[in-house]
Amino acid sequence: MTEITGAVEQGNDAELALDGSDAAISIRGLTKRFGNITAVNQISLDIKKGELFGLLGANGAGKSTIIKMLTTMLTPTEGEARVWGHDVVKERNLVRSSIGVVFQDPAVDGMLTGRENLDFHGRMYGMDGELRKKRIEEVLELVDLVEKADEKLEEYSGGMQRRLEIARGLMHYPHVLFLDEPTLGLDAQTRRYIWQYIRNMNEEKGVTIILTTHYMEEADSLCDRVAIIDNGKIVALDTPENLKDEIGSDTISLDVQSGAEALMQSLRPISWIKSIIANNGTIELMVDHAQSRIPEVMQQANRCCAKITSVGLHEPTLEDVFLKYTGRKIRETGSHANSMVARMHMRHG
Amino acid sequence: MMKQDLYAIYSIWLREMLRFFRLKSRLFGSIASPFFFLAFLGVGFGNGASLPGIPKGLAYVSFLTPGIIGMTLLFSATFAGLSVLWDREFGFLKEIMVAPVSRIAIVLGRTAGGLTTGILQAVIILISGILLGMAMPSIQGFLTSLLFMILIAATFIGLGLAFASKMEDMSGFSLIMNFLIFPLFFLSGALFPLDRFPGVVKDLAYLNPLTYGVDGLRYSLIGTSAFSPALDLAVLAIYCSATLFLGAYLFENTEVK
């Protein structure tokens, strides 16, 4: 596992992985239909060993279905996929022993203690008594649950359950770890903790990680590369930086009380301003590297005696990228979102 | 079979044991209703009353106890098979299914768990029956009855597993209870001799595996039976293999959505 840590740096040359030698996962034309509904539609993708890869999409976009096919929980309707070199249909058990999975909905036994849940897991992965004991202590420490180890899972908070599930997913030294919405429904602080664990596992242990999320910040801050999934298809695939660069410039918006005309006149000749839009007393400037341009804009305003009441700065986010490719914001989810809320209640209740 | 599969069978069995003994209300609840059947019917009909078809001089409680043991096994084993549904509902099925062990090991682990808890409850009912006045069976009779208990339990674990593998949630559960489990119980001769059933109903009873299970238990424990014990054993063994095979086959192909 140690030799793969170096492969992370270059994020966007997946074509090189086509020979399969450094692909942790390779997917070709993967499709899943439920009756008339096509949940996943002809997806092809390579994920490199050591990569931290994100599937970003709204609820119901098909992310979980992709994960379930890759983890042998669902059989693909068409296409094929290999995980750590093993076919997900023909070599299920080899796939299963290469991976760790943290599912979207909790998959723990609430009547067993944390330690018993981990013990069950260790046996299912053929670990003998001594190794199990050692690993249980290690992973409990990793997620700060040593003191809670002998309490039943039904006593755990949602965040603690999640951490235990992440610990469990790592217990048997998987090559590839799947995290389906790892921070769904958790508070901001717990979410940051979990991000930190995920980063550590990837960087220090060299575990290849595939996570799904509908949180933009999560994909942006964690992932080497991101695939945006919409209606079961990949609509964009690149590093978060490149995706945001495609959207282009930053926006400086100025609320102008007086002298707006004069200010616009003086700004027009400046070469680094790509466009100027005036709207109801607000002037929007499209520029690159907006933060370093603001002082110059303010000097211009002083020179022509324009009175500015506030300055706003907007840098492109993955949200803008998502909007561009799918035509809507990620939070605009329909009835599916409600069922998610119901499930969250189940988890915490 | 690989070492990993043996670990898995043990792991799943152990989990069933932990759950069974940890939830005291379930433990008592599962024993309570067969016990009440045994106590109220057994004592209520008394020792003197002789139902037609019951050999003369045989106390009703002696006749009834093997029937209630059959009932206990029917319910606990079907539940054990159907417990896949609970695991599906609460998500734990995914943790089991994603593990790198053969599906048959998972089925065997569940079966072992269901057999242990089922037979434990059955033995408690047997002891209750003896305390309520049933004649003490011989050691050999008791050991023979254990064989029948295993076959009965395995048959219905397989059946429960088959249903659970085809059901997506627990909504069909009460249908199974009302239109499968209770009819199987009442049509098994557990409460009174099969002779008392009218023609068509009797034919249905002859199709019921529990009929042969209860008859085999009566043969082992009180030395009286409607069929030959060899027939009981043969029919039960066929049903048992069939339902276990069907349960394992359907479970193997179940998808976890």
Image (cartoon, grey):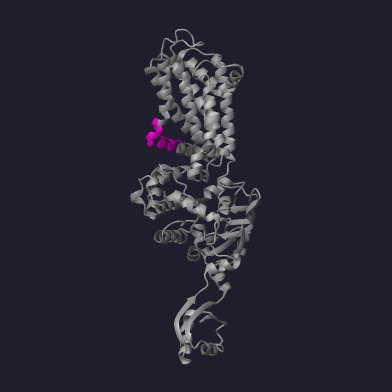
Q: Which residue lies most toward the bottom here?
A: A303
A132 relative to A250, above or below: above
Q: Is residue B34 left or right of residue A249?
A: left
Give the x, y percent position of residue A169.
47, 51
Given residues A207 and A211, the one toward you in this image is A211
* The residue positioned farthest toward the left in the image shown: A147
Give the magenta-colored segment's residue range.
B13-28
User: Does the image show residue B44?
Assistant: yes
Residue B136 x, y percent position in the rendering:
40, 14
Closer-to-camera residue (A263/B168): A263
Above-or-below relation of A95 to B59: below
At a point 56% along the width and 23% down the height, the residue shown is B209
Q: How many numbered discs sit on the rendered protein?
A: 0
Q: Could you say which quadrant of the image residue A302 lies in?
A: bottom left
In the image: residue A210, left or right of residue B57: right
Q: Residue placed at 59% from the left, 68% from the top? A: A324
| Residue at the outermost top position | B56
Query: Which residue is located at x 41 percent, y 20 percent?
Result: B40
Rendered location of residue B97, percent (x, y): 52, 44
Q: Residue at x 53, y 50 (%)?
A: A98
For residue A273, which quarter of the picture?
bottom right
* Viewer can see residue A114: no
* In this view, B64 is above or below B74: above
- In this rendering, would B212 be left or right of A154? right
Please name the predominant secondary structure of the magenta segment in the image. Answer: helix
- Residue A307: within the magenta? no
List x then y, in percent, for residue B229: 54, 15
